[in-house]
Amino acid sequence: MAISESPEIFNHQLQHQGEHSIRRRRIDATTATTTSNTRDNDNGNDEHSSSASSSSITDELEKKNSSEFYTNGKVEANQIENHENEKKKDGGDVPISYTYRPSAPAHRRIKESPLSSDAIFRQSHAGLFNLCIVVLVAVNSRLIIENLMKYGLLIRYGFWFSSRSLRDWPLFMCCLSLNIFPLAAFMVEKLSLHEVISEYVIVSLHVLITSASILYPVTMILSYDSAVVSGIILMLFTCIVWLKLVSYAHANYDMRALANSDDKVPGSPSDSADAVEKYEVSFNSLAYFMVAPTLCYQTSYPRTESIRKRWVTRQLIKLVIFTGVMGFIIEQYINPIVQNSQHPLKGNLLNAIERVLKLSVPTLYVWLCMFYCFFHLWLNILAEILRFGDREFYKDWWNAKTAEEYWRMWNMPVHKWMVRHIYFPCLRHKIPKGVAIVIAFFVSAVFHELCIGVPCHMIKFWAFMGIMLQVPLCILTNFLQNKFQNTMVGNMIFWFFFSIFGQPMCVLLYYHDSMNQKLGTD
């Protein structure tokens, strides 16, 4: 960039030239005073010696002031250096008298537009980001005002507390009795440690315990006319207990097999982080594992030194606030939209698309609040209380370019469980990689259906199909990512089908099916 293109740099340089001139005059005055004092003290010494002495003092003072100037003003020096480099690129220096003349060239080298494909990733987009935030706040403010003018304040205490919840005490007792199954698994491992029962009996008992741990709550929910929220909470606890019991049984089986064999894991010395743990059965290890924010069992975990009580208090306050925001969005926005809609598969197509798109924004906000409350706040609070060290509960899933990357990053506890107990065991049994991925998605789809369909007292397989449809979506987004390198095409397609289309569609389907079931029973 030439001087004619940057008057600020030119003025900045003139200012420094003026400051340097003032320093030079001060040095000359100091030199003159020093020379005069030297002549008085020497009483007629040689004039050539005095001149040489004053010259050396001048040089020292000038070096000192120049060093202080450039030491204290590194930013200015860098700007001047950059300006000199720009002048060299543009074809040399331009005299000051020709800086702003009409005949001075304004275009000196080839430059790209800031938003061109070659330069867009080298630019800062902080201003555009701020503009998007302002537009987002303005649009959502208008929607809030419009909703309040149309429906009024719809928040009722029934969302937080209902008399129907008092009748859900069987589900509460069922939740407390889930502790029986980890105790049973511990007794089985104790018997296996003392070699009282055979390996076949051990595996059979673990299969029986894990199956009973999930069938018992499902039977309780379907047997009682419980609230949907109570059923969802119980099913979430049930799925967590089942996943933990499977990991406990599988990890102990593997440690027991390695302890009974002479094989050693290649590349895993005993002091490395990847070393296989020694087989031992400890009640304290199982108890800590059942409450720790992880689904993968091991005899010991990385621990922090202390508990930050103030930090835990702040996170609890955030948890209460964002849970309230989530309830407000559900009551104020999602419920009216769903109640005023028709069945998406039985009504007008355009009307169904309009309802789905209108429902996509509040459902997306609820989903983000749920993610922040559970994966960031609650799991970190639990980890802090238990001094659990590994807190990588999620990665930057918002930057995922394919659906497969998203499912690997957004829920790390489940992802680690799938990789440890399903994916790699399938590969070790010579199952193809694609089939192993489909099996992992199948298990995830089954549990999604259990967590939604069972509390709603209907099994329609909408959640199951929604998860299984992620398999072709993974194939599509991977293909687009390989075809269009360094683009976010796969990311945009995934977010459209998953968040903008998939989640609102599932909400409408389950709502209308549950309403039709109630009307049919009545």
Image: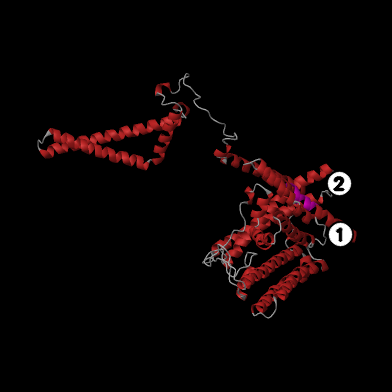
Q: Is residue 492 visible?
A: no
Q: Secondary structure at mark 1?
A: helix
> Which circle marks residue 518 in the picture?
1
First-in-chain label (2 vs 1): 2
Furthest toward the left, the residue is 44
Q: Where residue 327 appears, x then y in whole percent?
A: 71, 56
Q: Is residue 391 visible?
A: yes
Q: Residue at x 59, y 64 (%)?
A: 383
Rounded to the nearest whole Å, what is the CA distance between mark 2 and mark 1? 20 Å
The boundaries of the magenta stretch are 499-508
Q: Mark 2 — residue?
A: 347
Tell whether 192 sits left or right of 59: right
Tell whether 79 sits left or right of 262: left
User: How many badges with numbers are in the image?
Assistant: 2
Q: Is residue 505 magenta?
A: yes
Q: Nearer the viewer, residue 184 or 43?
A: 184
> Which circle marks residue 72 in the picture?
none
Q: Where residue 313 appears, x then y in whole percent?
A: 58, 62
Amino acid at the residue labelled 2? Gly
